[in-house]
Image: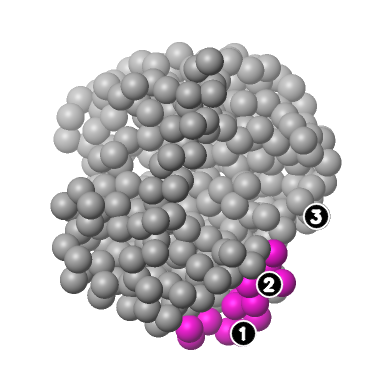
């Protein structure tokens, strides 16, 4: 019986396969986990290496024409036989933790979403940037804790979702956009009848400047598509979903684009046009998605968002710089 299907979209990932496969082996050794590797039109030797990996009884390989991560993940999910799905990246690795303990939680089937702990590291320096440890709420349903959605993050790689929930309308990944996680992960958490906080750090995410999210400023329209999807399918829980939208726009996307200006990756006039588009979307949100006081934002955060919305387009750069200082301070504390 397959309890968990680990789904991995891969494009030109040959250099990462060996460490990834070594890290996932403890899960495969349980006999209750399958690994689905999707070759998303790679042009290097990824396809050949994947075919060699498919000799493992728990590994399946799919070869697709290049269509992006959303399409690859959805295709893998359609072929998966597990009760739960875990979507991860081949250029990351699993931490050494007790795989059997996690599977025991999944076997009970009491939770539609499981949040696991993770570490983020700088792949160039190997320094830990930060970590998320759900141990404070370990084993609890955690619904009351999810008012602060940003603590769970909007990425799929530390979320394990039941197959039934993933295949519900609006819950699968958007295809053809680079914000496929942002479009659905808040909906997973919002729709889940029960959420389990796994107390272990199970995943190590490598921060790469050249990744599609951190380095691609040419597809800003993709985020608009993702946010509109959240509005369309998140009306049953506008407080949590609205908070996710605000966090993404004001505290992640705009600061990241401001950093692009400082590095010469984004022309100032292009940033200002994108800022105007995002503010237009924010102003057109239904009122139930816009109540930042109800969403739990502090007075300082509400004031910042109000100023940015009114045209103070340069303020997100200050947020980015502050976040950078805080990350450096945490890194120094961790190394002492």
Residue shown at 51% from the left, 47% from the top: 155
Dot 2 corresponds to which residue?
293
Of the numbered discs 3 and 1, the one sitting upstream in the chain is 3
63 to 18, vertically: above or below: below
Taking the image as shown, residue 195 lies to the left or right of residue 284, namely right
**Secondary structure category for the residue under label 1:** helix
Dot 1 corresponds to which residue?
287
| Quarter assignment of residue 301 | bottom right
Please name which of the two marks, 3 or 2, marks the residue nearer to the observer.
2
Q: Position of residue 290 (x, y in %)?
A: 60, 78
| Quarter assignment of residue 261 | bottom left
Q: Is residue 285 magenta?
A: yes
Of the numbered discs 2 and 1, the one sitting upstream in the chain is 1
261 to 232, vertically: above or below: above
Residue shown at 68% from the left, 60% from the top: 190
Dot 3 corresponds to which residue?
144
Q: Position of residue 184 (x, y in %)?
A: 53, 59
Nearest the viewer among 151 and 66 is 151
């Amino acid at each position: 019986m397959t309890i968990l299907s680990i789904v991995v979209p891969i494009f030109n990932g040959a250099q990462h396969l060996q460490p990834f496969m070594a890290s996932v082996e403890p899960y495969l050794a349980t006999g209750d986990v399958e690994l689905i590797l999707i070759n998303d039109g790679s042009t290097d030797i990824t396809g050949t290496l994947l075919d060699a990996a498919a000799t493992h009884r728990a590994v399946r390989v799919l070869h697709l024409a290049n269509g992006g991560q959303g399409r690859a993940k959805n295709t893998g999910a359609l072929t998966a036989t597990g009760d739960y799905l875990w979507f991860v990246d081949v250029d990351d690795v699993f931490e050494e933790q007790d795989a059997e303990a996690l599977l025991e939680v999944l076997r009970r089937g009491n939770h539609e979403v499981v949040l696991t702990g993770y570490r983020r590291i700088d792949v160039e320096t190997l320094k830990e940037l930060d970590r998320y440890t759900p141990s404070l709420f370990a084993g609890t349903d955690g619904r009351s804790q999810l008012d602060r959605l940003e603590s769970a993050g909007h990425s799929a790689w530390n979320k394990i979702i039941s197959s039934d929930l993933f295949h519900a309308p609006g819950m699968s990944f958007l295809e053809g956009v680079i914000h496929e996680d942002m479009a659905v992960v808040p909906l997973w958490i919002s729709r889940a009848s029960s959420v389990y906080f796994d107390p272990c750090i199970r995943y190590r995410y490598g921060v790469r400047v050249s990744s599609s999210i951190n380095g691609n400023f040419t597809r800003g329209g993709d985020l608009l598509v993702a946010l509109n999807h959240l509005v369309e399918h998140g009306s049953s829980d506008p407080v949590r979903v609205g908070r996710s939208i605000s966090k993404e726009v004001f505290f992640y996307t705009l600061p990241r684009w401001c950093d692009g200006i400082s590095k010469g990756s984004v022309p100032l006039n292009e940033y200002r046009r994108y800022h105007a588009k995002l503010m237009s979307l924010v102003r057109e949100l239904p009122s139930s998605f816009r109540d930042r006081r109800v969403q739990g934002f502090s007075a300082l955060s509400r004031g910042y968002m109000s100023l940015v919305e009114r045209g103070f387009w340069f303020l997100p750069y200050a947020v980015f710089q502050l976040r950078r200082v805080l990350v450096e301070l945490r890194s120094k504390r961790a190394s002492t």
